[in-house]
Amino acid sequence: MPHNAPQKKLAATIRHAASIALLLAATGCTGSRSAPTPENFTRALNDFYLAHPDCLLPGIRFPYETSDKATTAQMDSLVQSLLLTKDEEMSIHASRYTVTTAGARFAPHFCYGHREVTSIDSSTPLAVVNGFKETSVTFHYTLKEVPVWARSSAVLAAFPDMAKAISQPPTATTRLAQTVAGWQVPD
């Protein structure tokens, strides 16, 4: 066998492996986390929502004061659930809410669970946005780890959007961006 034979055989094997890898990548048979599949969309959405729960009060800090009747009714439902206390300032017709010891676990945003995707209903064709391929995915989900206080009749009545999300599998649409590491919800 000539001296160059092992090197030529190695080079041919590398070329053959590279061509197979390119063929698999071109046909989408790599099992890649960045392939536009319902399984990959589900994984990306579940990862995102596990770290981003649904909350009643995303922009509020405590102590909190309000004179708005609708907001007062919502806050009063959390008082009934023993998550907040209420002090009324009659001279200015305002209510001041502070977090109780029991409410401290959920304050300040009072998150009531995280979404878990149950089905991917559709996705838009891929389009390049800010240098990444993106799609909008429509899906059904259920809420997981819903606390007891969120199921109280007073809170359900005061927060109808939350009540609807808890009682039936809602749908949502979210944009996903394709990255080398897989699909992600863009910032």
Image (cartoon, grey):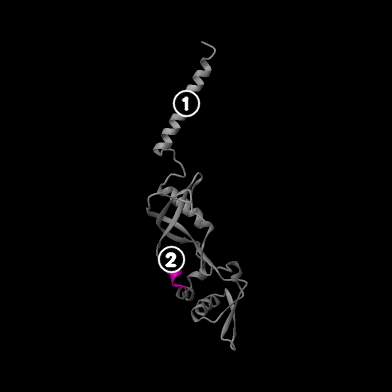
Label 2 CA crowd tier, 10 Å (few <14, some 14–19, many 20+): some
Q: Nearer the viewer, mark 1 or mark 2?
A: 1
Question: Which residue was labeled with disc 2?
Answer: 165
Question: Which residue was labeled with disc 1?
Answer: 15
Residue found at x 56% / y 86%: 93
Answer with left or right where residue 126 lies relative to residue 75: left
User: Residue 175: percent from the left, percent from the top?
Assistant: 44, 55
Give the quadrant of residue 169.
Answer: bottom left
Q: Residue at the bottom extreme?
A: 91
Residue stretch in magenta:
159-166
- Between 7 and 40, the residue placed more toward the observer is 7
- Between 47 and 130, the residue placed more toward the observer is 130
- What's the magenta bit mostly, secondary-structure-wise? helix
Is 162 included in the stretch rendered in magenta?
Answer: yes
Q: Say above or below: 109 vs 10.
A: below
Q: Secondary structure at mark 1?
A: helix
User: Residue 30: percent from the left, percent from the top?
Assistant: 44, 38
> Marks 1 and 2: CB-CB under 8 Å?
no
Q: Say above or below: 166 vs 139.
A: below
How many marks on residues? 2
Answer with left or right where residue 182 lies relative to residue 125: right
